[in-house]
Amino acid sequence: MSSTSPVPPVPDAVLLTVTRRDQPGITARLTGLLAGAGATLLDIEQSVVCGQLLLCMEVRLPAAPDVRAALLAEGRELGVLLEIHAAPPPPAPGAASHHVVTLVGRSLGAPEVNAVAERLLRHEARIERLHRLSDAEPSSLELRVGLPAGHSPQELRRSLLELAMS
């Protein structure tokens, strides 16, 4: 595997995305490098699905360009795909309300997830995070949903309840 990065000019914050087959130590080594460089961790999310790691970190890097080079070198040494991109600007305060939607069933497959995703789309809601709560096959899922300002959480709730009753 290789490490790639379109190196943007030094932005306020960058998004580091790391993917590969999971193995112990990836997060420890990368966050250790960031800590040693004096970087500021703004956000982090890590998930392993079927043995594949997805690690995303929003980081404010020191201005020194050697930090980017060190990250890319560490990525190559770890055998991960490490990408560095300018982080998108944060949403304006009050731009969205956040809600949690929990799906529970004997088995939740693509049809059930699609039905909920389509219903959320009707309300212009974004799925910001989706993860399985059950140990084995998906029988319970939790979605963190962002609803744009001006959209009614009560309307969304009513719509989802109608779907659940159908």
Image: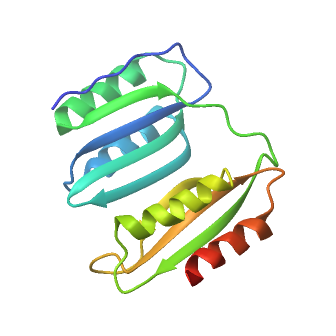
Image position of 31 (left or right of 156) = left
Residue pictured at 56% horizontal, 80% vertical: 164
Report whether 89 appears left or right of 55.
Answer: right
**Which quadrant of the view contains residue 18?**
top left
Q: Position of residue 143 (x, y in %)?
A: 53, 65
Instruction: Tell me the residue at 52%/40% (across/down).
Output: 58
Residue toward you, 1 or 72: 1
Point out the image quarter for the N terminus: top left
Q: Give the quadrant of the C terminus.
A: bottom right
Name the residue located 54 percent from the left edge and 19 percent from the top edge: 63
Foreground residue among 161 and 129: 161
Task: Where is residue 45? Give x, y as percent.
Answer: 46, 53
Q: Quick check: 115 above or below 104?
A: above
Location of residue 147 with respect to 83 vertically, above or below: below
In the displayed structure, would residue 130 be above or below residue 57?
below
**Of 87 and 23, the residue lying toward us:** 87
Q: Position of residue 69 (x, y in %)?
A: 34, 20
The one nearer the camera, 164 or 142, is 164
| Relative image position of residue 52 (x, y in whole percent) | 23, 53
